[in-house]
Image (cartoon, rainbow, N blue to C red):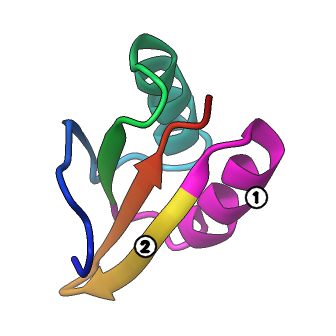
Amino acid sequence: MNNIQMVNRVLDARGLNCPLPIVKTKKLVEEMKAGEILKVLATDPGSKRDFESWCKKTGNTLLESSFSDGVFTYIIKKGG
């Protein structure tokens, strides 16, 4: 993670298929304050497209996305 100051929460969505990673992310983000950072771990290959689209639609910022050893990692900043 480059230039990521601090992750406030982590969501492990590994092993979950669409739409569960987004559903769980949405629920957790609703509990967060504006500006907080969420790290999501997922294994669903469709999650990359889903998270990009979801962030654009909801006003949250996808700061970073990466893939390593079968796991997608998303760093999301809650909009506000």
**Does the magenta run of residues contain 44?**
yes
Residue lying at the far top of the rendered structure: 31
Q: Residue at x 37, y 59 (%)?
A: 75
Mark 2 vs mark 1, CA separation in Å: 14 Å
Question: In which quadrant is the N terminus drawn?
Answer: bottom left
Q: From the viewer's perspective, tell me whether residue 58 is left or right of residue 43.
A: right
Q: From the viewer's perspective, tell me whether residue 39 is left or right of residue 45.
A: left
Q: Secondary structure at mark 1?
A: helix
Q: Amino acid at mark 1?
A: Ser
16 or 31: nearer the eye? 31
3 or 41: nearer the eye? 3
Q: Which residue is mark 2?
A: 64
Q: Which residues are magenta?
A: 42-61
Question: In which quadrant is the C terminus drawn?
Answer: top right
**Does the magenta run of residues contain 41?**
no
Q: Which residue is mark 1?
A: 53
Residue 68 image position (x, y, % from top left): 23, 87
Q: Earlier in the sequence, mark 2 or mark 1?
A: 1
Q: Residue at x 71, y 48 (%)?
A: 54
Name above or below for residue 9 compared with residue 33. Answer: below
Q: From the viewer's perspective, tell me whether residue 48 is left or right of residue 59.
A: left
Q: Residue at x 39, y 46 (%)?
A: 16
Q: Main secondary structure of the magenta part?
A: helix
Q: Quadrant of residue 73?
A: bottom left
Please state which of the two labelled residues, at mark 2 or mark 1, is closer to the viewer.
2
Q: Residue at x 51, y 16 (%)?
A: 30
Mark 1: few/some/many CA within 10 Å (<14, 14-19, 20+): few
Image disc number at residue 32: none
Residue 13 image position (x, y, % from top left): 32, 45
Q: Amino acid at mark 2?
A: Glu
Residue lying at the far bottom of the rendered structure: 68
